[in-house]
Amino acid sequence: MTSAAAKRRLGVLISGRGSNMLALAAAAAEPGFPAEIACVIANKADAAGLGLATARGIPAIAVAHRDYPDKVAFEQAMTAELEARGVELVCLAGFMRLLSPWFIDRWRDRLINIHPSLLPAYKGLDTHARALADGVRIAGCTVHYVRAEVDTGPIVAQAAVPVLPGDTPDSLAARILTAEHRLYSYAVAMIATGAAVVHGDRVDIDPARAGDGTARLFAPALPAL
Ligand code: GAR
């Protein structure tokens, strides 16, 4: 009798609605997915995603940053929760607190983030409005390992979406969010299977193990003119 390969244990950190967390949960519910969500942690007790995780039977924990005297004390409390549940990979999913060098070093190469732009373009906030103001034709999202400087770090995977005439920040955000939901579970699967391996400042992709996802780009089909 063969036993199924051990699944990589994920800790998902959120601050709000948690739609990327739900997309990861949906992927993890598939029997063949190589990772499982060990816990969801929010830095605010009223984060909507906590209730959504609980409803799916996922341990959901509030570690409210306001309850701690400083950032590192808050991050030590999160780390204790993550370690108590055997978390091997921390996934930031709309986690809107800047992390200290202590936490980033503590989880180095085991901490990833999803960001709503094609990094290194549009780091920071208001990515969709800034992309529209610049008139870009392609926008997207990035999953990357976290390094000390905000929204930098080795890129695991990216998805591109078109910017369409008449787009508003909200309509572009919605289109990118749909891509985020596909991209995050894809990136986690690549890491969990060893198809993506971080080495220093870059992620190496093993094409033999990445399968059809080797392209790593969900480019839109061009319409006929
Ligand atoms: C997502 O669009 C995510 O990329 C973004 O916040 C949203 C969270 O939505 N993250 C950042 O901007 C981080 N800098 P969700 O709570 O529904 O997953």
Image (cartoon, helix red, strand yellow):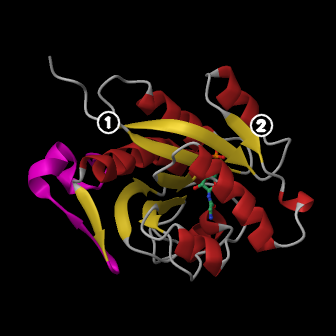
Q: Is residue 169 visible?
A: no
In the image, what residue occupies the spot 62% across and 22% down? Answer: 57
Taking 6 as reference, is 151 above or below it? below
Q: Amino acid at mark 1?
A: Ala
Residue 26 or residue 13, whichever sits in front: 13
> In the drawing, what numbered circle is on residue 126?
none
| Mark 1 lies on residue | 6
Start and end of the magenta stretch?
Answer: 200-225
| Mark 2 lies on residue | 48
The CA span between labels 2 and 1 is 30 Å
Q: Estimate how packed mark 2 is, as few (under 14), some (14 to 19) or many (20 or more) residues with alpha carbons within 10 Å.
A: some
Number of numbered markers: 2
Q: Quadrant of residue 36?
A: top left
Q: Is residue 29 visible?
A: yes
In the image, what residue occupies the spot 43% across and 65% down? Answer: 144
Q: Is residue 202 magenta?
A: yes
- Image quadrant of ligand 1 equals bottom right
Disc 2 or disc 1, which is closer to the eye?
A: 1
In the image, what residue occupies the spot 44% across and 67% down? Answer: 145
Q: Are marks 2 and 1 in contact (CB under 8 Å)?
A: no
Q: Estimate how packed mark 1 is, as few (under 14), some (14 to 19) or many (20 or more) residues with alpha carbons within 10 Å.
A: few
Q: Amino acid at mark 2?
A: Ala
Q: Give the left or right position of residue 60, taking residue 1 as reference.
A: right
Secondary-structure class at tag 2: helix
Residue 62 image point, x, y percent: 78, 44
Residue 143 image point, x, y percent: 44, 60
> Farthest top residue?
1
> Farthest left residue?
208
Residue 218 image point, x, y percent: 31, 50
Q: Give the left or right position of residue 3, taking residue 95 as reference.
A: left
Residue 161 or residue 52, whichever sits in front: 52
Q: Is residue 168 magenta?
A: no
